[in-house]
Image (spheres, helix red, strand yellow):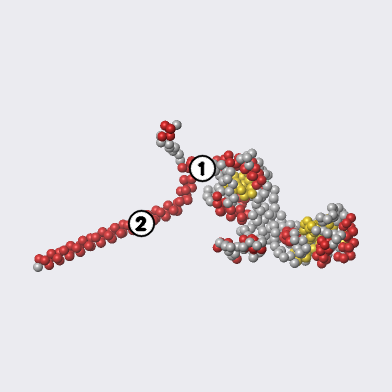
Amino acid sequence: MADCEKLLAILEEKFGAKRDLADKWGFTVLVERENLHALMLFLRDDQSAKFDVLLDIVGVDYLGFKDYEGPRFAVEYVLKTMKAPVRRMRVKVLVSETDCKVPSIADLYAIANWQEREVFDQYGVVFEGHPDLRRLLNHAEFEGHPLRKDYPAHKRQWLSTNDYLLPELEARLESKGYKIVARSKEVMPNDDEYLEGSRKV
Amino acid sequence: MTALAEKANIITSSLDFIVNWGRKNSLWPFPYGTACCAIEFMSTETARYDLSRIGSEYVRFTPRQSDVLLVAGTITYKQAPILKRIYEQMAEPRWVIAMGACASSGGFYDAYCTVPGIDHIIPVDVYIGGCPPRPESFFDAMFQLQEKIQDESYMKARAERVKEQLEMIKAKTAECKENAEKAVKNAVSCGVQTIKEGRDNLMKKVAFWKE
Ligand code: SF4
């Protein structure tokens, strides 16, 4: 905590960040999304911060939240460091429903790739500059974003057939240095086998 | 002993009984384990409970070699087509056990992501309650399945299965018979013709020599 409070002055000055006073027990800073990428880079690399672990990226939907005014969505980045015992921080970006975009930080933390895909999948927040923004948990034919408060929790959606992942698997094997010597005719990539929304290799 | 063995050693029985006896005592499960229930199945396999006592120790990890599809765990909508495909790949005869609350009814995952019971996708023979069920209940399910198999009739199923084939064979036989009859008639008329011709020739020759 003390470390973080020291950091706050720099964050305020450099990135226009504010401490979120609603978080009474932890330490959360609010930042505009324009400054998010630079701020995360600073937090990762600066000697006094060194937040080298991105624990999670969390989406929040404030629809119907008691006594709340402001943009509907928020994205929170939970950070931790391996260099000091209790230095933890959360960074929060507020996003409005009409302009539901946040810059991606997948180039700073490798794990952010999947975490951002998850938030996109469940909340529909678009991460700009993400290398491969697809659904992660729900299937390719799913419509809507289930963790939004206005998604009916019992609305079930069937998947018609399983996704065609073999070409992706082969591409991955090849990138690891394996070679595909033979393929049987049945497993040849065939455009009809792909579901809409899945990635073609 | 030798005297006994020298005598004819025959048991008479119905085919149904023998087939069912063989089937029910070597049920090879395919463990479709997607969640915590699969752990309980593993302990059912271990020496303490020992599923091999009823001949099911061969856990097959390919649907083409197994008789019982054991669905142990939560099935999500993303998983559902895979489960269906696995079921379709299994050879007849095949049975399905839904193990645990999740596979039977969706369990407490009463939400957008979980299939509320695998019977929405594939037919189920035995359901096991519990979260997770104990190995004892798994044994109970296996015994129930065995009882069910006992009542099945191999011959009836076979008759049903080969019905089309049988009809085809019947039609083919009738056709062949007809063809054969025609051929015989042809041959007979041909033979009559040749005999007639031969006699005519002979008559001509006789007439010639007479002259
Ligand atoms: S029934 Fe219970 S133990 Fe079995 S898979 Fe579901 S949650 Fe896990």
Quarter placement of the N terminus of chain A: bottom right
Q: In this rendered view, identify the residue nearer to me: B153 or B110.
A: B153
C-alpha distance separating marks 1 and 2? 40 Å
Q: What's under tag 2, amino acid-wise? A: Cys
- Under circle 2, the secondary element is helix
Q: In this rendered view, identify the residue nearer to me: A94 or B5.
A: B5
Residue A173 location in percent, x, y? 64, 61
Viewer-nearest of labels 1 and 2? 1
Residue A150 visible in the current orientation? no
Disc 1 crowd, CA 10 A, few/some/many (<14, 14-19, 20+): few
* First-in-chain label (1 vs 2): 1
Compared to residue B26, the image places residue B199 above or below, namely below
- Judge from the rendering whether residue B17 lies leftward or rightward of residue A106; answer left or right: left
Question: Furthest-left residue in view?
Answer: B211
Q: Which residue is mark 2?
A: B176
- Judge from the rendering whether residue B39 lies leftward or rightward of residue A11; answer left or right: left
Residue found 46% across the figure and 48% down from its top? B159
Q: What's under tag 1, amino acid-wise? A: Gly
Residue B197 visible in the current orientation? yes
Q: Quadrant of residue B139?
A: top right
Q: Which residue is mark 1?
A: B22
Residue found 64% across the figure and 47% down from its top? B72
Residue found 28% across the figure and 59% down from its top? B185
Residue found 56% across the figure and 42% down from its top? B55
Q: Quadrant of residue A113?
A: bottom right
Compared to residue B100, the image places residue A60 above or below, namely below
- Judge from the rendering whether residue B131 lies leftward or rightward of residue A71; answer left or right: left
- Judge from the rendering whether residue B175 lies leftward or rightward of residue B161; answer left or right: left
